Amino acid sequence: MALGVSRQYYKHGAENISFKARVEELSGQNINLCYQCGACSSGCPLSKEMDLLPSKVIRLVQLGRDDPLSSRTIWVCSTCFECEVRCPRGIDIASVMEALRQIMLRRKYSDVKLESIDPEKLRSLPQIALISNLRKLMA
Ligand code: SF4
Ligand code: SF4
């Protein structure tokens, strides 16, 4: 029984390592540098719209957990870089968010579906909002 649990742990561990390595490769960031000070989350102007705070996203990736892939947070992030400016370890968190979006986009998933927006509304939306959304389709 104990051996079974152990095997399960190591199997899961190996998968975790590959997910974390993938995010680090795509973002160019060393996720292990994060010591969970929370400065990124406290400064994020969009944290109220997120289901996972930026610091939690980083922690989950650190643990090799891919939960952030299904979060609203990665699509809400506007790449404003406020978190990077505040991070005492110099982690570019926006690039981590981008890496997570890239993984999802390469799986043919996108949170932004322009065709589902009413054409009337589309005409009245600020251009910057559209450009910002389209940018997220370019990974
Ligand atoms: S880059 Fe994204 S996560 Fe960082 S502060 Fe801006 S919106 Fe928040
Ligand atoms: S500011 Fe940097 S070190 Fe602090 S929790 Fe965020 S990513 Fe981690």
Image (cartoon, rainbow, N blue to C red):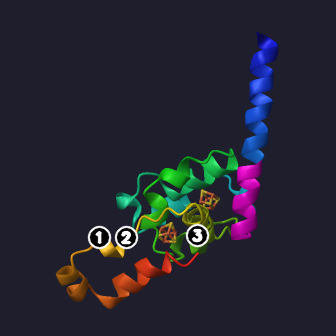
Give amino acid for label 3: Glu
Q: Do the residues labelled 2 and 1 touch (CB within 8 Å)?
A: yes
Q: What residue type is labelled 2?
A: Lys
Residue 50 or 13: which is nearer the viewer? 13
The residue labelled by disc 3 is 98
Question: Which residue does the numbered mark 2 point to in the structure image?
Answer: 113
Instruction: Say what amino acid the circle numbered 1 marks.
Output: Ser
Residue 29, visible in the rendered structure: no
- Mark 1: secondary structure: helix
Which image quarter: residue 48? Answer: bottom left
Residue position for label 1? 116
Q: Residue at x 48, y 54 (%)?
A: 53
Query: Quick one: SS at disc 2?
Result: loop
x%, y% of residue 73? 46, 59
Question: Are there few (<14), some (14-19), or many (20+) residues within 10 Å of tag 2?
Answer: few
**Which region is colored magenta?**
18-29
Residue drawn 59% across and 75% down?
139
Who is closer to the viewer here, 51 or 137? 137
Q: Which residue lies furthest to the left in this view?
A: 120
Asked if residue 19 lies in the magenta stretch, the reply is yes
Foreground residue among 65 and 83:
65
Kindly tell me whether residue 2 is visible in this rendering. Answer: yes
Disc 3 secondary structure class = helix
